[in-house]
Amino acid sequence: MLDLNQVRAFLAVVDHAGFSRAAHALETKQPVISQQVRRLEADLGRRLLARSHAKTVPTSDGLRFLPYARALVRTEARARASIENGTLTVAASSNIGTYLLPNILSAYRSRSAAPAIDLLIGTNTDAAHHIESGTADIALMEWWDGRSGFDAQIWAREDLVVIVASSHPWAARQSIRKDDLFGETLIGGEAGTGTGHLLQELFGVSSKDLKVGLTLGSTAAVKEAVKAGLGISIVMSGSVREDAANGSLVPLPFADTTLVKDLYAILPSDQPESSDASAFGRYLAKAG
């Protein structure tokens, strides 16, 4: 088992480019830092640092170990905060974290027994990394690849809708048919949300005939591009409720099919049922 004091010593040497400066930063003596690093290298069976009088830098093995070392230290800090302050860390994809979670968290935190919540919003890949590296207690994502060591449950299903600008010829419609999409310019959003896979399932080999124009990195950017008349897009219905209410975008359901995205809550398989993360997962399943 890795010794976190040794890991912290390694990180201090990397961050301060030398043993003396690392010792000063950690308020200890240089021989102590040197001994801790030597023991860590012996434990891992690899040389982690290239030492010189001018500067100390990570070796290739040290560079490979570096992100895991930082994750270990962050996880320890988060574990202490969770115990001391009762903090639940939730990692969420941008669509879930921006458009769906605020109301859910508001209702959840109004309960007297609810813990403080830290919300980490990023891409779906970011959320997967957070739960795998231990920097989040639960991850809320738009897909899951079934990797071992984790349990996934579907906590909500979101309808996907086509969005058009209020000036678009389709704006007066109540719905569209899936074949209407051919010939229109589609604006793509964040990669890795699973929407592309759903379209492939819907259209089969014909999906390659869909015309994709811009590919943007977020739903917020997609909505602005659609409002500007640059094309149409397909998004979760929950992400455009406010835009539909103020008339800046028109969401159109499909008349001849149902396109639904499953939303997943991911927990480590060894998460105790009594934990705050498990309790939040159960709340999501009921609220969703």
Image: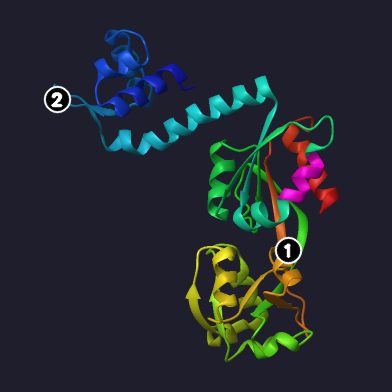
Residue at (76, 78) in percent of width and height:
253
Q: CA distance from mark 1 to mark 2?
A: 56 Å
Asked whether, in this view, residue 57 is left or right of residue 238, the answer is left
Image spot of residue 208 (x, y percent): 53, 84
Location of residue 214 with respect to 184 vertically, above or below = above
Image-quadrant location for residue 95: bottom right
**Residue 189 disc label:** none
Residue corresponding to mark 1? 238
* Dot 2 amino acid type: Ala
Residue 224 forms part of the magenta stretch: no
Image spot of residue 57 (x, y percent): 24, 31
Q: Nearer the viewer, residue 151 or 183?
A: 183
Q: Nearer the viewer, mark 1 or mark 2?
A: 1
Residue at (50, 63) in percent of width and height:
217
Asked whether, in this view, residue 63 is left or right of residue 103, the answer is left
Location of the C terminus (image quadrant): bottom right
* Dot 1 amino acid type: Gly
Residue 103 forms part of the magenta stretch: yes
Q: Nearer the viewer, residue 150 or 285?
A: 285
Q: Secondary structure at mark 2?
A: loop
Write down the region rendered in magenta: 102-108
Location of residue 31 with respect to 198 vertically, above or below = above
Residue corresponding to mark 2? 54
Asked whether, in this view, residue 83 is left or right of residue 56, the answer is right
Residue at (64, 74) in percent of width and height:
234
